[in-house]
Amino acid sequence: MKSSSVLSSPGRTVPSDPGRQAFLLLRTVFTVAPIVFGLDKFTNLLADWTIYLAPAATAVVPLPAQTIMYIVGIVEIIAGIAVAVRPRFGSLLVAVWLLGIIINLIVLGSFFDIALRDFGLLVGALALNRLSPRHSR
């Protein structure tokens, strides 16, 4: 019995290659999540994001915490778009961004559970980078 290289459904084909499926899954998540969280920095519907900002950040950047969160939101939206358009580059941008979040949470001295979760996301972003073809379609 010969197996097909794609699974068929009405109007769509999904590659059956597990590596390609993993790439598409990670690319989708690392596109949507940063954009959603970035937009939420402007509305604070999901969380009051300023509580996650270490006071050292406002000492270095003399802006109100919410203004810094607006900048963070813009960067996150850009990172999500970068993953969609250039996943090889965008995944590294997300990984570096997550490392910055982890460092911020460690400096804050709390939310270590979130820092650990973000470390897992950082590893996922690096996995996306390794799975990304040189010139994504």
Image (cartoon, rainbow, N blue to C red):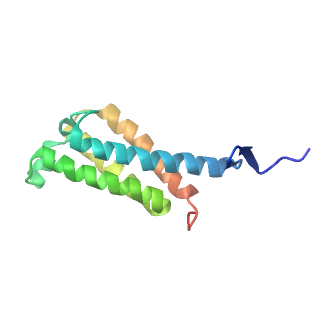
- Residue at (56%, 67%) from the top-left corner? 134
Left/right placement of residue 79 relative to residue 87 reads left
- Viewer can see residue 57: yes
- Above-or-below relation of 113 to 28: above
Residue 116 x/y as whole percent: 37, 37
Residue lying furthest bottom: 135
Residue at image x 40%, y 57%?
Answer: 81
Give coordinates of residue 95: x percent, y percent. Answer: 40, 53
The residue sitting at the front extreme is: 11
Residue 123, can we see it? no
- Spot the residue most to the right: 1
Residue located at (24% from left, 43% from top): 41
- Quadrant of the image occupied by residue 50: top left
Q: Is residue 36 left or right of residue 57?
A: right
Image position of 133 with respect to 54: above or below: below
Residue placed most toward the observer, 3 or 123: 3
On the image, the x and y values in percent for residue 136 come to: 56, 63
Q: Residue at x 36, y 48 (%)?
A: 35
Nearest the viewer among 38 and 98 is 38
State the quadrant of the C terminus: bottom right
Q: Position of residue 73 (x, y in %)?
A: 26, 49
Give the quarter of the figure containing the N terminus: top right
